Each structure stands twice: as structure tokens, then as C-alpha cells.
Amino acid sequence: MIYRECGVFKANYRADMAIFPIPLDRWGVIIILFIAFLVVPFSASDYWLSSILIPFLVFSLAALGLNFLTGYAGQLSIGHAAFMAVGAYISLILYGRYEVPLLLSLLGGGLVAAAVGAVFGTPSLRIKGFYLAVSTLAAQFIIQWVLTHWEWISGGVFGTVDTPPMQVFGWPIDTPVKKYYLVLSVVVPLTIFGKNLVRGQLGRAWMAIRDMDVAAEIIGISLFWNKLLAFAVSSFYAGVAGGLITFTYYGAANIEAFNIMVSFHLLGMIIIGGMGSVLGSFFGGGFITLLPIFINQFAHAFGTALKTDLLACLELIFFGGLIIFFLIVEPYGLARLWRTGKDKLRLWPFPY
Amino acid sequence: MIFAIEVAIGGLLVGVMYSLVALGFVLIYKSSGVFNFAQGDMTLFAALALVGFLTLLPLWLAILAGLVIMIALAIAIEAVVLRPLVARPPLALFMATIGLGFLLQGIGQGIWGTDPKGLDIGISDIPFKAWGLLISQFDLVGGALAGGLVFALVWFFQKSRTGRALRAVSDDHEAALSVGIPLRRAWAISWAIAGLVALVAGIMWGSRLGVQFSLSLIALKALPILILGGIDSIPGAIIAGLIVGASENLAEVFLGPYVGGGIQTFFPYLLALVVLWFKPYGMFGREIIERV
């Protein structure tokens, strides 16, 4: 009774194509956006904004990118953090060295990352499965090396570039609230764009390739374009996310912030959140960002001051255990649980 | 010239040590169709367990105890992780092994601590001169061990009854079940063998680098070897290991100075990518024919 799908009368094509056809969903999204834009910035503390909400949003964006590639197009990538690194360095260089406006330099970082991603996606035309997964690792190592050793980019072997003070349209972005707004105003449009992308022709082509690429090719889907586009779009999102997190969270582009562990975390996010689901990317992003904080609180609740290395081990155990748990019990992740919950609410509290 | 040969031989011997890790991947893939990303973490786990036992037991008993631990681990993995995932897509199993890797890292370091530990098995790492070339005794022992393992494993897979059963399982889980191969036992056996290989690799690499977290990163060195040689080819793992070891050493020494050094970290991947462009299933991998 609570989640109602009735009363939806699609009288024209526009209504039939609507992104959220059910009024309750539409209202839900509007309320969430309202809370995100108008309630959270004024009620959350600086700590929450700058060390939980900003990484949550940015990593969700990166996970969304990986979800396009792995969840929708079925091409596993275990070197995705490298594309974040490309976006981070390029957007910093554009902004700091060439004084391109901030939003444009984020876009530029994303576009360069997309180009690099498409190049590393070319093997997917010939190879697939595990061979492809390992060859995406090549992206991780080659990009890491290039970024640290090419002096035009890193300015030295250590490969750290600091962020200059930020401004958008002349407004300085210095407080956590303003940074949060910056992140939100990049993440929300990109998410809506992504949601529409996977509903459209491209997303359907990707899903056909994921389900069986030989069959997809036979019915006339160009594997060449669609696979390369999957890599490019996915890397674009990763690149923008990399640029954003460098500007608003790390403060300096450092190659260690985008090492292979980050790639695995992204993969964990989409497994736990839900493969092939836009909403799931956000669930996963939130889950993985909050997990270390959770474990920390949990340890404190027991009163014993656990050693930091033991805490790190606990984190690894939980992360690995959760990946296995979700793969076995709920292969479509938290997004599927959410859906099951909605199905239950349709009838509840009546039995039939 | 002598220097170049020394560099190449040093690389070849290191390559054999890489192959030891790559071998673990090939074994599990060949015998259960699972790409086991946790092999590096199993190596770390085995080495950690061995060092832990060494504080209580003499070397041979500790190795035996390590072996028992790895077999128990294999049985546990089969029961907890693999059995519920029967007949699921191979990529799901692959991702489960990524999770397994984190789990093993966490458990191993949680029990035995994160601080680097030394491991001394009584083979000196001091190079000696033979025919005018500097060669490390340690590398030779490693090479001999790897060679012996390869011969034993090739024999096992080609000739023995169990080995043939394992190959059938890797081909198709359900078909193997239907002709009466006990899937659960086959999986436990193949993971136990991979555990044995991990133990050997853990001993060799652990005594060279010390037993610590970075040991699990050896797997990242083994992966390009794996796709270069073909995921399901035991000789491929050895030959590709030799190629990778020698070429990365030569590249680092002779090419490195021109581009700023450190190319060892990615050169094997570059090599593997180039080869994959021409041979999508590696040099010796079995080609998969797909139908709709």
C-alpha cells in the first residue's frame, strides 16, 4: 500500500518515455535532491561534509563510470583508478598552469581520460574475459609510470601537483559547504545524463554485448564502436571524478591516491552496490566510504583501543567478506535489495 | 657483452621465480576453470603461516604444518566460496577470488602481524662465479624447484586419473558432474595443489624479500606472464616467465636510462599487450570457439 504503482496513465509518448514514470519515485527523487541541496549543507558539520559526503559522492560517480563498463557492457576493468589519475592530473594542469576555468578544466580532464580509456579499450576488440581483465591492469601500471616520469605532467619523480585556490565564475571555493556544492552540481547532472544514457540506444547495445557479444554482433550492433564508447564514457566519468576528488578532497594530485587498491575498491563498490544499476553505484559508493568509519566506531564501542594495523586488517576482512557474501547471496547487490524492499512495500501491510 | 649475458641470466632466474607464482594461477584455471586472483595472497598467507610455525617448530615440521594449513584452507574455500557459486558465470567466480584475496590478507596479517619478518631456509643468496659469470645460488635452487614442480604437474595433468578428471571439470562444471566426477573433491584437490605451489613460492620469495604485505604483490608480476603464455598452459607459464624475466631485466638496464628508469614495473604488461594483439589467447593458450 505504501509503494503504489497505480494511477499511472500514459496518454502520450512523452509520458511513456519518462525517466521516473511512477509519481512516488519522482517525488522521492525530488525530495532527495531537495535534502541534498538545501538541507544537508546547513545541517551537516564540516567534518561530515568534507570527509564523508564529498568522497561518497565522488567515488559514487567513479563507480557509476565503472558500472557502465562492467555492469552494463560486461567488460571487466581492474585498472580503473588509473583513469581517475589521468583526469586528476590533466584537470589540475589545465586549471593551475593554463588558467582554464575550473568546470572546463574538469571537463578537459574527463575528455583526456576518455581518450586514454578508449586507447586502453582497444584490446577488448580482440580479447575478452580474463585476458582482457589482466590487460586492463596494464593501464594501471603504464599510466602510473607515465604520470610520474613525464616531467611536463608531474614536474618531477615524486609526481605531486598542488591545487591552487579554486574559483568558479569568480566565486572562491574555500569552505567545505562550497566544495560540497561544487561536487553536487557536477555529480547530479552527470548522474542524470548517465541514467538516460543507459536507458537509451547505447545502454541497450551495451547490455546486448554483455549478455552475449557474438549474438549482439549478429543482430547488427557494432562491437567496435560500442565497446570503445563504453571504455571512453566510463573513463570520462572516472576522469571527472578524479579531478573532483583532487580539487575538493586531497588537495594535491598524488599518484598514490589512485593506486591499484582504489581500482579494487571501485570494483567492490559496484559488486556490493549492484552491477548494472545507476542507483547501485551510489549505494556501493556510500557503503565502501562508510565502512572504515563504521569499523572504527564499532571498535570504539567495545571500549578496547584496537591497534591501527589490526583495524586495517579488520577492514580488509570485512571488505573481502562482503564481496564474497554479495556475490553468493545477492549478485545484483544492494540495488536488488532495494527493489525487493519496494516490491514488499507494494502489498504491505496487507498479506495479499 | 659478459655484462649483458649476466643481466639476461639474472633475469631468467628471476623469471623462473615469477613462474612459480604464475604456475599457481594456471593450475587452478586448468583444473577448475576459475581465474584465482587470490594466488598472490595465498602466497603471502602461506609464508606468514610458515614464519609463524617456525617460532615453534623445526623447519621441516613447520613446512609440513604449513602444508596442512594450506590443504585445510583449500577445503574451506571450496565449502564456503566455491560451492555456492557453481554454474555461475566465470567472471563472478573471478570477482569472488578478488574478495577472497582481501579476506586472506586480512586474516593472515591479523593473526601473524603486519610487521616484516625474515625467513631463513639456509640457502645463501651470495652470487658465485661459474664460467666467468656471476650467478646466485639461491636463484639456481629456485629454478630447480620450479622446474621439478613443472615436470611433476605436467605428468599429473596428462597421465594421472585425477588430473584428467580435473581437466574435465575445468572444461564444463555441469558436464563433468553428469559423467560422475565428484566436483567438490576435484575443486578441493586443485585448490590444495595451488596451495602447495603457493607455499613453495612463499618460501622462495619470502626468504628473498622478507615476509610482509608486499609479497602478495608478486602476483601482479605473475599476471602478464600468465596472459603471455596462455592462461591454461603449464609450459607456457614457464616459457613466458623466462621471456618476461630476461626482457624486463634487459630493458631496465639498457633502455631504462634513456626514459628515466623504473620501466620494470610495466614492461611485462606492455610485452603481454603487444603479444595479445596478435595472439588473443597468449602464446600457448587454448583458443575458445564460441557459438550463439
Image: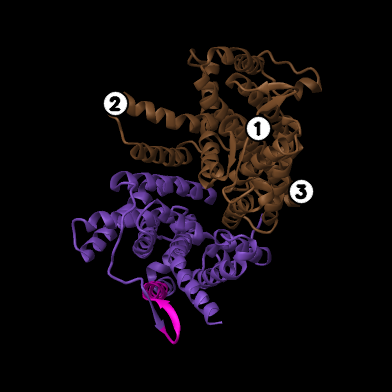
Q: Residues within 10 Å of mark 3 (few under 14, many from 20)?
A: few
Reading the image, the residue beneath label 1 is A164
Does the segment drawn in magenta span residue B132?
Answer: yes
Q: Is residue A64 visible?
A: no
Question: Given the image, on which type of amino acid does mark 1 rest?
Answer: Pro
Q: Is residue A177 left or right of residue B13?
A: right
Q: Is residue A216 left or right of residue B201?
A: right
Q: Which numbered mark, 2 or 1, is in the foreground of this view?
A: 1
Query: Quick one: which residue is furthest to the bottom in this view?
Result: B131
Secondary structure under tag 3 reads helix
A188 shown above or below A80: above
Q: CA distance from mark 1 to mark 3?
A: 38 Å
Between B193 and B245, the one lying in front of the other is: B245
Secondary structure under tag 2 reads loop
Residue A349 is marked as none
Q: Main secondary structure of the magenta part?
A: helix
Reading the image, the residue beneath label 3 is A225
Q: From the rendered image, report the letter of the chain displayed in brown.
A: A
A21 shown above or below A330: above
Chain B: colour as depicted: purple
Residue A302 is marked as 2
Question: Given the image, on which type of amino acid does mark 2 rest?
Answer: Phe
Give x and y (percent) for residue B38.
44, 52
Q: Is residue B25 visible?
A: yes
Q: Which residues are magenta?
A: B130-152
Give x and y (percent) for residue B248.
56, 67
Answer yes or no: are tags 2 and 1 on the same subunit. yes
Q: Which numbered mark, 2 or 3, is in the foreground of this view?
A: 2
Mark nearer the N terminus (1 vs 3): 1
Mark nearer the N terminus (2 vs 1): 1
Q: Chain of mark 3?
A: A
Q: Chain of mark 2?
A: A
